[in-house]
Amino acid sequence: MFPCASFCSGHGEGVSVSPAVMFSIGNFPVTDSVIFSWIISAAIVLAVRFALRGGVKTIPSVGQSVIESIVGGLRDIVEPVVGRGAFATVFPCLLGYFFFILLQNVGGLLPGIGSIGVRINGEFRAFFRPANADLNTTLALAVVAFLAWAYFCVRCAGVKALYFEIFGNKADKSEISSVIYGILFFIFFAVGFIECISILCRIISLSFRLFGNTFGGENLLHNMYGFSSILKNIPVVNYLSYLIPLPFYFLEFLVAIIQSFVFTLLVSVYVGLVCNHGDHEHRVEF
Amino acid sequence: MQIISMIDFGELLRTFGVDWHLLVVQSLNFAVVSYLLYRFGFRSVVRLMDERRAKIESGLEYADRMRKEIDVFESSRAERIEVVKKEAGDIIKSAKNDAKLILEQGKVESRQLADNMVASAKREAVHIREQVIREAKGEIGLLVADITERVLQSQMSEEQRNEYAASAEKMLLSENLQ
């Protein structure tokens, strides 16, 4: 397939925890995951444009139906979580998260991704690495999610509500004595600092959850290919060796969907914790 | 806290190959993709879905309103039909009564008219009969007298002829009266 003998497959060797720098533009290192994420990003935008070619219609085309069903399904799940007041503001960002993570994950399962590369000094370097198998991508997503969360909370609920949510005394003054209420005020204020740490830890939990699942899946697939390579040498079962990674591809496809959904849902839950207080406004028009 | 302070975050990030350049680039990558997806794709889809939902909701609301109006119309129509049926029944009953009354009145009047006509006809008949009798009596008397005269001129005396004519007239009168 490749004319150069140095190109090879990295099956069975496991995946490096850090991305490989393919080349540099000044001080900026261009890694295999960055190249892959750019390609997939362009593909996502083009695919959506292609699906909606000719504009959206009241009677939808096949592509529009697919997008509508995904968007509608996500909206039905996310809207009650975020709250109707904040939904219109938050939903575009959530849609971006869902589609970006889903298609980056699914793109990572394409043949050749992480498996075709070059061996330099005995070490295998893949040309492409799934974007979410690089902590830089997932950390960037988590940081953006954190900043977006702060923005949405301030915009939709206000600084006062955000402060109250973190440091405020949530006890009901009518049900307890004022002495206990005063004590609780200090306790809630102190708990607020722990809450701040917890909020900051969301960056770590979001990024490492997605990274761990994708990176683990990538390793699993590589190891299964390695295992099938061993079976290829056994006469009777060598034909079955190609089938061994197949179930794990299905598993990883499921993981790709679930992880994109989990990330999106967690961001919406974080926003909903501050912005959604059982409001009953009517549906917000875009 | 001791455990946290023991972790060398710099080393940890280096192990995972975290680079702030890459973080910035990937953040921008995501932001740009999200913006483009929403600006050129999802916004119009979401707007259309909202419009469609609004149309469906208004359609259902309209159908519901129409159904309620139909129910109200049906119930009012049923009530109206009942009222009209009752009115029609009353009118028919009244018409029947009127017709019966008119019929009775007509019968009485026609009977009265018929009686009058019969009475008048009887009177007329009696009058005509009397007139006819009177005329016939004279005619017959003359005829009898003439015949008798002719007969008796040859066979009877004057006295016998008069006596015979009187008895014949008397006999004719009694027959006619009968």
Image (cartoon, coloured by chain):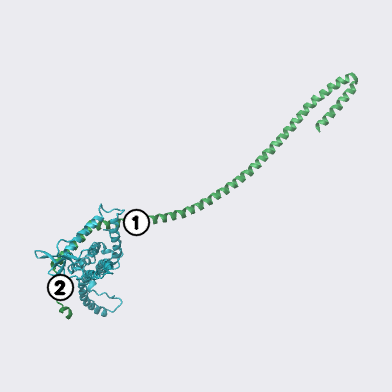
Chain colours: A cyan, B green
Q: Label 2: few (<14), some or many (≥20) within 10 Å?
A: few
Is B130 drawn above or below residue A96 in the view shown? above
Residue A59 pos. (x, y %): 31, 53
Q: Earlier in the sequence, mark 1 or mark 2?
A: 2
Q: The C terminus of chain B lies in which quarter of the figure? A: top right
Where, by quadrant of the figure, is residue A285 drawn?
bottom left
Report the residue marked by disc 2: B15
Q: Can residue A50 be seen here? A: yes
Extreme residue in the left direction: A26
Q: Chain of mark 1?
A: B
Image position of B160 with respect to B104: above or below? above
Please name the amino acid that badge 2 sits on.
Thr
Of tags 1 and 2, which is closer to the observer?
2
Q: Quadrant of residue A251?
A: bottom left
CA neighbours of label 1 inside 10 A, class few (<14), some (14 to 19), many (20+): few
Q: Position of residue A76 (x, y in %)?
A: 30, 63
Kindly identify the residue that appears in the image at 24 percent across and 55 percent down. A50
Between marks 1 and 2, how big is the CA–CA gap?
55 Å
Direction front: furthest residue:
A235
In the foreground, B65 or A132: A132
Tell me the tag on residue B56: 1
> In the rendered view, does B90 fall on the left or right side of B125?
left
Q: Position of residue A27 (x, y in %)?
A: 9, 65
Q: Is residue A208 above or below residue B75?
A: below
